[in-house]
Amino acid sequence: MSDWGPVFVAVILFVLLTPGLLFQVPGHHRCVEFGNFRTSGASILVHSLLYFGLICVFLLAVKVHLYIG
């Protein structure tokens, strides 16, 4: 049996933390903008740091596991 937990966590976080899809930090006109479908270099950096931090929390501290098969 293979562990699919890290794969599902990574995909869900990647979709939710895509800059401009749900929210963008920092925004073009405000600190946080919601649903503007635009991005910038700074927001890509901030969202990638958020992704790294959350993926570490979920995979190393919480130890999410999902076995299929």
Image: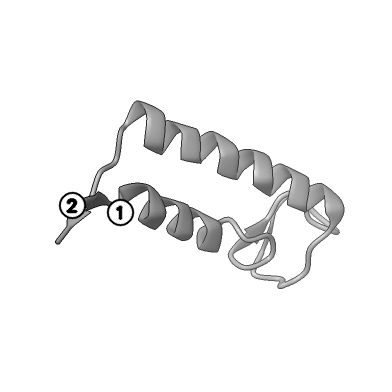
Residue placed under numbered mark 1 in the picture: 4
Q: Position of residue 1 (x, y in %)?
A: 18, 52
20 to 27, vertically: above or below: below
In the picture, measured across the screen, residue 45 lies left or right of residue 3, that is right
- Residue 44, numbered circle: none
Is the Cβ of the residue at disc 1 closer than 8 Å to that at disc 2? no
The residue depicted at 37 percent of the width and 57 percent of the height is 8
Number of labels in the image equals 2
Q: Residue furthest bottom?
A: 37
The residue depicted at 39 percent of the width and 36 percent of the height is 59
The secondary structure type at the circle numbered 2 is loop
Q: Give whichever of 50, 25 is nearer the camera.
A: 50
Label 2 crowd bin: few (<14), some (14–19), many (20+), radius 10 Å: few
Residue 26, visible in the rendered structure: no
Res 28 quadrant in image:
bottom right
Q: Give whichever of 23, 58 is nearer the camera.
A: 58
52 to 29, vertically: above or below: above
The secondary structure type at the circle numbered 1 is loop
Residue 69, visible in the rendered structure: yes
The residue depicted at 75 percent of the width and 52 percent of the height is 44
Q: Position of residue 47 (x, y in %)?
A: 67, 48
In the picture, measured across the screen, residue 57 lies left or right of residue 38, that is left
In the picture, measured across the screen, residue 35 lies left or right of residue 16, that is right
Residue placed under numbered mark 2 in the picture: 1
| Amino acid type of the residue that numbered disc 1 sits on in the rendered structure | Trp
Q: Position of residue 6 (x, y in %)?
A: 38, 47
Between disc 1 and disc 2, the foreground one is 2
The residue depicted at 71 percent of the width and 71 percent of the height is 36
